[in-house]
Image (cartoon, grey):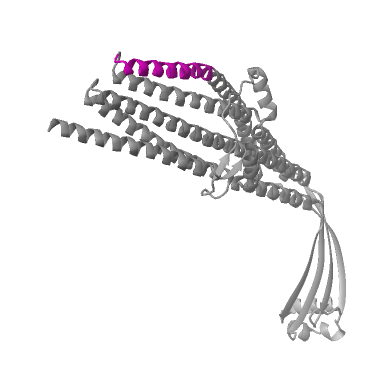
Amino acid sequence: MAAQLRTMNIMKMKIWVAAAGLMALLLLAVTVAVYAAEPLSLEQAVERALKNSPGLKAANAQVEASEAGVLRSRSGFLPKVTVSETWSRSDNPLMVLGTKLNQEVVGQADFAPAVMNNPDPASNYNTRLSAVQPVFNGGKEYIGLKQARLARQAAEQDRSRTKQETAFNVIKAYYGVLLAREYHKVAVQSFETSLANHNLAEARYLAGAVLYSDLLRARVQEAEVQEMVTRAESGVKLALANLNYAMGVEQSREYEVTGTLSAREARPELAAAVGSAAGSRPDLAALQLNRKNAEASVSQAWTDFVPSLNLMGQVDWNSERLAGDDAKSWAVMAVLSWNLFDGMVTTANVRQASATASRMRSLEEQMKAGVELQVKQAYYNYEASLDRISATTTSVQEAAEGLRIVQKRYEVGMTNLVDVLGAESALIRARTGALQALYDNNVADAELKLATGSL
């Protein structure tokens, strides 16, 4: 009975091993199928993002809107010309007399008291062409044009920053795909190692050298690594979807990323990086322009205290007929106005503009300090990633050698399976840690360039 049970266990183990081998082949086939897609370099990914990104399209629209603002501000220097057609009918004595005067049809009979007091209703069509030319408004038009140009420049700087952030998001997502792909390779390698340990434990169990518990432990380890492979496959798909999202394309599209994760060891000087950020960050430049715009708003508010002078001219055609030209007249006027008291509205506007300008100056100081902190954080992360790469490279070699030694010792019965599985787990951790260090190094390099405004 015991012999039959042992034979059945052996057959089950062989079936398990065969199934595991078939699973490994399927995983490799899936890996090949996943990567048999359109090749995509990092430069191509960034180019597609700059073409398709909704955020960048919004930034472009904002620049167009600011350009329209410049055009609108220039209108303050130009005359305003309007044409109108007005119809009226009345028996009001004053309006009737005025209508006849405008139509140039007043006769002697119109001055009779009875006629003047009780006139017949009169109709009039008035065609008017008028123009208003600003002459002096305390510099309001000049300040408005200056503010519009500052707003346009700020929008252009914001667009530049959006481009950099879009590129960074794509670079990070692209490296994420590379990391997920390498994780998948490590998972497949780990599965092969786990399968080899399973076979080794089975052989020793069949030889009667170890207990059945060793074989069970090997099976559990193999199942865990197989789950790791499954998660890695999902990670590749998710990373590709994230890359598509960053590029602004359909998330179902598949690519074969052509880049590799390699150490980037160019170390800039920290002081130079901070100085570069102060002069190159588009978002900081945009805030400086907005601060200047806020300061110009103070001068704009003060113009309401200054008198304004405008020239006005008009030509009128009056007739009993629509669009008639029976009578023509013209007028030219110079209008000087001065706001002597408006209920403290202008004073309040000046105070509000001054407070806004003060707020913008404070925000600029805060952002300068924040930019310096971002550069330092990115710089230190970059330095740490280089140290981790050096450490993890050594640990992978040592872990691989340690697993080889422990496997040899287990084959001759000098150690137990727990040590083998522990060495296998250590190798998995070392490999994934090395990949994570490379990924962090590449991302930190891009993040440092983003922080300095040179991406």
- State yes or no: residue 442 in magenta: no
- State yes or no: residue 402 in magenta: yes
Q: Residue at x 81, y 85 (%)?
A: 112
Query: Does the image show residue 403?
Result: yes
Q: Nearer the viewer, residue 441 or 206?
A: 206
Q: Main secondary structure of the magenta part?
A: helix
Residue 171 in picture, x, y percent from top left: 59, 35
Residue 216 in picture, x, y percent from top left: 25, 29
Q: Is residue 142 above or below residue 8?
A: below
Q: Is residue 263 above or below residue 293?
A: above
Q: Nearer the viewer, residue 431 or 360?
A: 431
The quadrant where residue 125 appears: bottom right
Taking the image as shown, residue 383 lies to the left or right of residue 143, namely left
The quadrant where residue 364 appears: top right
Residue 207 in picture, x, y percent from top left: 25, 23
Specify the quadrant that holds the C terminus. top right
Q: Residue at x 58, y 26 (%)?
A: 262
Q: Which residues are magenta?
A: 387-413
Query: Does the image show residue 347?
Result: no
Q: Is residue 51 above or below residue 193?
A: below
Q: Nearer the viewer, residue 96 or 260?
A: 260
Residue 206 in picture, x, y percent from top left: 25, 26
Q: Residue at x 29, y 15 (%)?
A: 413
